[in-house]
Image: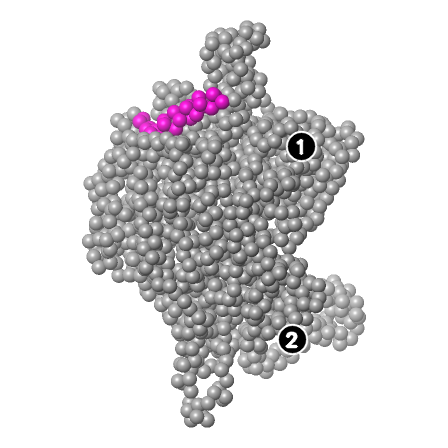
Amino acid sequence: MVPTSALIQINSKCVLSVRVFINRNKVLKSITNSDTIFEAPILSNNSIIRLKTPAIRLHLSNEDMKFLLNEIRDSLLFMLYELCSPILEEKVLNKLKIDTFMDFADVLEILKKGSSLETRSTDVYNPIDGIDVHITSIERTGKKSYKLHFSHNWRLDILIENIDKLHHWRKLLTLLDSVQSVSNTGQSIPLFIPFKSTNVLVRSIKPLESDTNSSKSEDPPILIEPEDDGLGQVPRDEIEMVDQDPNDIKLDTKDDKKPIFDYQYKGMRLFDKCIKIHVLGRPKRGKKN
Amino acid sequence: MSLFLQDDSDEEDLVIELSNLSKNDETADVIVEDQPKETAESELSENPQSEVLGDTEDKVLYPLIPIDANTETLKPNIEEIRPVDVHLSLSLPFQHLILENLLVSENALLVIGKGLSVLSIVSNLLYTLSTPTRIDGTDKRSLVLVLNASSEDEDIIEEELMELQWTCNEDDEEGQPGDRPFTVISSDSFTVDQRSKRYQQGGIISVTSRILIVDLLSGIVHPKNITGLLILHAEKLDSMSIESFIVEIYRNSNKWGFIKAITDSAESMISEFAPLAKKMKDLLLKRILLWPRFHADISSCLNTTSNTKVIEIRVSLTDSMSKIQFGLYECLKKCIDELNRKNPELSTEYWSFENALDSNFLRIINGVLSPKWHRISYESKQLVKDISTLKKLLTSLISYDALDFYELIQLILDANKPSVTRKYSESPWLLADESQLVISFAKKRVIDDGNYNLEPLPKWEQLCALMEDIEHESSKYPAGTQGSVLILCSDDRTSNQLRQVIRNMKSKHNGHKNIMLDKLDIYRRRRDDMRRISKDIVEENEKYQNGGEMNVSRAFHKQEINTKRRRTRGASFVAAVDRLKNAQAGQGQDIDAMITSDSIKEERDRSLVSMETLGDEAAVKEDFDSEDELSIIEEKLQDGSIPEYAMVQNWEEVWERRKTGYKYVDNDCKIVIETFSTTSDEQILHELMPSYIIIYEPNLAFVRKLEVYKAIHRHNPPKVYFMYYGDSVEEQSHLSSIKREKEAFTKLIREHSNMAQHFETDEDLSRYKNLAHRKMQLSRMKNSRIAGGQDFLNPMTYDVVVVDMREFRAALPGLLYRYGVRVVPCMLTIGDYVITPDICIERKSIADLIGSFKNGRLDKQIRSLSRFYKYPTLLIEFDDSQSFSLEPFSERNVYASAASSTVHPISGKLMQEEIQRELSHLVMKYPSLKIVWSSSPLQTVNIFLDLKTNREQPDPVKCVQFGSTKKQTGKNKKDTESNNKFKNLLTIPGLSNVDYYNIKKRYKRYADLLNASVEDLKNIVTDPDLSERIQLSLQRQELLDSVESDDDSDPKTLNT
């Protein structure tokens, strides 16, 4: 019964790895009665242990996982970018004692008041523009660990194991962010990959700029698309996951009846071993995994 | 350590507890006697158990299994027997079998093959064993302790237990007694109070052995409260270890609890004679369960999944590589042969080339040599070191790239150059002809006939081809249905190397060359830096010609670290110092001279490799700490003179931008490169559920883990590629590791089948045996003239030794306990062991001794010892496995600091003399100091017992008070003294209370006031006459005091 790990790209250089646990009790209320495979009294105990056949492992399908992680996008970003900001650190993180919790609306309110950025939102539950944080409360569970309760379509507990890590990531991300926001000159920032860490590469479809642009730059890709119904099916599925640009290019190349697209691999800075998600309830849908 | 440096309140509690301990013969016994009464009383009440434990806690959160004094109460009430359902998280039949076996066999030792998911079995076992008991209608939690678990083990167990909790019934949820909380108690997490609370709450607790032993001895947790012990990594334990001590204490007063031990390393067990019998004796176990991989149940379960085959990719070495490998093999052979020739009386048949690839080879050789280390020749020691160098070279040949390997060779050569500090010859292996082969081909791999060769590793190409295959294959499936790609290799260096390779795989013009050229560039820059530094040093050296040697080398050391920060490479670190020293006139520079930035650029142009990647990712990557990272980015930012980040006005924009990057990465786009590890790689395998697995280097444990994984995921098995170099070290060591494990199990099985069944009674426990022995010894010494030697004049008391809590890492307290001595753990400020009221002992192992000479701590310790005790004693303790001589230690110590390569043999002698000199200094300074030399902990025990015969027992309360509290009273005394003196001021005519207050406020201490001038006083009291009067009276007072103190001085010194 191990968790499933999922990878989220935060920006062009960093990926976040989260581990998703499924609380069986909460998700599947009725536990199917399975067969007893072994029965024995344990010494020093007056109980007879009945070992039951193992429950089948539960994990989220790729589709579900995608849905889940898109739903908590704003919350995750909030955790990465704002939770460790000086204001919240002083007024929330340090104030909270172990085993106490705080309403998250108050947290947002504190941030709203404390920051110099303006916001027009009047919503009490979501006073900050641009994001929908569905976190209801924050709880401190240990010296460095916090637990956030998330409730929207999904019901989740988001656990932060080590706030120091998050703190460091925030610094890194805001720095990267500020570089990106200001300079589009392509000034290269070295990517730091710690020597002792898991290495992660992300495969993406390589934009074949130089070759394709020269040959087929004038043809609008839309014209070609309907002609290619039969052949396009399989790659079309793939298109959904990639960006727009390679999409166009691929359609270009398909004209030659020979899809020449290539992959590229990119090393990523991995943020791992900090954020865990406990799934307590999933949205009601027809599908079952 | 930090755990025990708590605030005073904790200590006081302990002291009180300890004084209770010493008053009663055994508080434990008293508690036990109390129990039946209390339980009888409490049977009337609703919640019986909270009363039982109420001695120390007002309210117990959860009831525990009771402390049962008499076995009658153990008999369960038949009506209360109930079935408890446990849903397992193990899915394979053999795992169930192992678990069942473990559950039914009392006190079992499980020896399981490597990589057979031992931790999931452990977690399920823990969960099952901690099932609450129902007595008198209430559920009582059990307390199961896990010993010897590493922090990774703990993490995994914690998660598995959490998941198990989630699969169980509703009424076992959090907050209910059925809940089985998992707590980790390690050195820094809990105070004494918190610990005792945790123990009383019950559940599953993983506790550091050293803490548990102290807790057991000082009564924070009573053995009768503990349902059972589970010991992980049993192979690491022996009769001297704390765990075996704990087990003995536990068994002494708890006969019903379970003890279970688990190990997954059969090989490390068989190094001794009759390992199973010994382990069973050490940990008081009764049964052995052997589960090798070739066990019928396991193989039937794992072998059937042959529907998916592993694709083996056998890569052959390049010509140069196989030549180098041949050369290294020959050198290794010669070294081992030479070692055998030099030490015919020590060598065993194990010392052969066939076993050289065994990872334990050197450890076993050292195990034989080190007790005789002072007798073997300098050459032999050198040979042992060479063998380790050669082994390292062999592995780096196939894992390092050509340039790194060449650099390593260069480093070794440089370190072996004759220099001022080392007149002795080169390492013997460098004298062999084959070594030249190694060196020349290592060069050839980088530069051949003046051209860059820069040979890529053969596996790189295969890996790229594989990646392309995978790309192609996965494109057949619709997106999102395929899992990720997982690549496994042995270490972080390789992992980073592979990332580079894959990243550059698609660059059109020869990706590998690109990587190598980048590396070459970095190498050149680093080398230039080093040259510059070494030049600086030489200049500095010339400046301070006399006696500046030490200074310079230290200053140099600092610089060295600075420049090497990003390129720390294992053992070669300090060797680099030598290298730098000699870098000026190096002979191996011929290639280096060719590597210049121009030539690299030329090469780049020639091979059409663009510079674009340089400085992007490759530039800074290896070792850095987190602060470094931020500062470098900030630097970059400032370089570009980028305006402040406050351009954005509202949140919406901020979030919009942040959201753009956010994307869920589909599994099939994910490539994860992970290193083999004992625990975490298995976890990653299960979490990622990869569709493609590339095992870059062979690893036995991981192959097993994969087998298990495939058996579990039978319906969607991953495709596995297994890469290795044919006819190489890699292949051989993998095969030999399989063979060794099999042999180990065969040996264990044979022993098990021949093992005699062993029964013992309570009296057989070694403690009692030894105690009886001691009693006999005592009685022999009784004087028959006094009332015919009758007992009543000489009341039998326990021998007591007060031991500092920090000393429980050592084997000595455990041994003392086994010899029937009551060991009382205390926070001692002074000394480590107090054996009589007069004798206090400071124990030092040799390494400690040298260390504390260096930092001067020993002097301080002995000083305080001799202040409080009549016979301050320094115990210098050696180990069984070490030679009883100072020489090897002094030598070793130098090795430790010089990390590698050769040390002048005389330096050992020098060190030895230094130790002797320091010791004699100490004796001269403190004439009352006694020094005891002991060859092993066992001998120490005997010395202790001899010293204790016919002497009084120490008083723990007093021992604790010495030192710590004394200081406080001394300070208080001083305070009151200066207060009294201040009060004398009030007798001066004309000095008001306000003046007095002001003076006191200004001068906190009386001594300060004495030094004050009339002017200063004038500023405070404003009256010039008064200030003069004060001054006068102060002087008079001082005169008086000095006369008094002369009288006092004698008794005072006696008192302290």
Q: Nearer the viewer, residue B366 or B630?
A: B366
Instruction: State the scheme by which the image is colored.
Output: one colour
Side (left or right) of B713 relative to B31: left
Name the element at disc 1.
Answer: loop
Q: Nearer the viewer, mark 2 or mark 1?
A: 1
Q: Position of residue B56 (x, y in %)?
A: 65, 67
Q: Amino acid at mark 2?
A: Glu
**Which residue is label 2 attached to?**
B1038
Prevailing SS of the magenta stretch: helix
Q: What residue is drawn where x is 48% and y is 50%? A: B99
Whether residue B547 is in magenta: the answer is no
Q: What residue is drawn where x is 65% and y is 34%? A: A282
- Subunit ID for the residue under disc 2: B
- Let me know if marks 2 and 1 both belong to one chain: no
Q: What residue is drawn where x is 39% and y is 28%? A: B463
User: Disc 2 and disc 1: Cα gap in Å?
Assistant: 87 Å
Q: Position of residue B866 (x, y in %)?
A: 49, 74
Q: Disc number at residue A283? A: 1
Q: What residue is drawn where x is 49% and y is 54%? A: B103
In the figure, residue B765 lies in which quadrant?
A: bottom left
- Subunit ID for the residue under disc 1: A
Quadrant where the C terminus of chain B sits is bottom right
Name the element at disc 2.
Answer: helix
Q: Nearer the viewer, residue B328 or A279?
A: A279
Q: Nearer the viewer, residue B1006 or B158?
A: B158
Range covered by the magenta-colored residues: B452-477
How packed mark 1 is, by other alpha carbons closer than 10 Å (few <14, some 14-19, many 20 or more), is: few
